[in-house]
Structures are given as structure tokens and as C-alpha cells.
Amino acid sequence: MQAQMLAPAATLVLWSLIMLLWTAGTRFPAMAKLGASIKTAPPGGRGQNLEGVLPDKVQWKSHNYAHLMEQPTIFYPTVVILALMGPNAGDITIAWAYVALRVIHSLWQATVNTIPVRFTLFLLSTVCMLLLAIHAFELTALSMGGNA
């Protein structure tokens, strides 16, 4: 069951890389339309410098990639803790729900990007993350004899 707990994390890593490729695949052509490229970018340039330069719809992919580098950073160690401590079937289901919600959130933000739906997806994934974190805490507290 421990390996099954790691599969959602591996899937989210892969999805994050897909979003990175999608970001590049939309950003570079948009930059080319403006006559810009990474070869002509000034030293120290950052993706944030493209805000207001590239169309918002192009930037949405980048915004989502940045989001995938935020909250999921606590998902990964939580999944590892659960895998090491012995997850239950509910943990695995919740981890997959978290990943599914993050993928749907990505697709929504990258294409439609209306805030009420996006926020709802984020909130639901956060509830999944909270449930996983609570169980990881409980398992580690139990392993210490309940003295956490």
C-alpha cells in the first residue's frame, strides 16, 4: 500500500512538467509575435516581467505552473510521511482526489480562468490536503507514543 500512496505524487510531478511545457509552448510563440526572444531578453529578466506584455490568456499557464510550485510542495512530503507510516485506503483516495482537483484547476485556470470556479477547485483540493496532513500528523504522533 505504501507504493500506492506515492503514485499520486508522481502523477502530480508529471502534470507539473506538462504545465511547464504548455507554458513554454504558448509563451515563446507569443513572444515571437512581439519580436522578442530569450536571446534578446535583458540580463536578469524574469517571467513576471512579461505581465502586461503578453496576453493574459498566454500568462494563465505560467500563473498555474507557479501555483503548482506552491501548495503541492507540502503535498509531496505529506504523501511520503503517509507512505512511510502506513497509509490507509482513504489516504490513497484522498491523495488521488487532490491530484485530480489540481489537474482540473490547472485546466480551468489555463483556459477559462473564472475566479469562482477556480477558487472552489482550490478550496476542495485544500480540504483534501488538510485531511492528509491531519492523518500524517496523527500517525507520527502515535509513533511517538502520543506525546506530540
Image: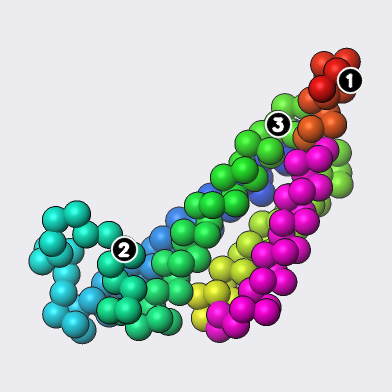
Label whose residue precedes the other's in the sequence (1 or 3): 3
The residue to which callout 3 is attached is 81
Residue kind at label 1, given as amino acid type: Gly
The segment highlighted magenta reads: 112-135
Asked if residue 32 shows in the view, the reply is yes
- Residue 136 position, x and y percent, is 78, 35
Residue kind at label 2, given as amino acid type: Gly
- Residue 22 position, x and y percent, is 41, 68
Based on the picture, tell me whether residue 5 belongs to the magenta stretch.
no
Label whose residue precedes the other's in the sequence (2 or 3): 2
Q: Is residue 4 left or right of residue 54?
A: right
Asked whether 93 or 129 is in front, the reply is 129
Residue drawn where x is 77% and y is 44% of the image: 132
Q: Is residue 36 left or right of residue 147?
A: left
Instruction: Say what secondary structure mark 3 lies in.
Output: helix
The residue to which callout 2 is attached is 47
Label annotation for residue 40 = none
Residue kind at label 3, given as amino acid type: Ile
Instruction: Say what secondary structure mark 1 lies in.
Output: loop
Q: In the rendered view, would you say 90 is above or below 126? A: above
Q: Quarter of the image holding residue 55?
A: bottom left
The residue to which callout 1 is attached is 146
Please rate how many residues cluster around mark 2, counting C-alpha atoms within 10 Å: few if below 14, some from 14 to 19, many from 20.
Answer: few
Measured Cα–Cα span from mark 2 to mark 1: 46 Å
Q: Is residue 144 left or right of residue 28?
A: right
The quarter of the rendered structure image containing the C terminus is top right
- Residue 43 position, x and y percent, is 14, 56
Measured Cα–Cα span from mark 2 to mark 3: 33 Å
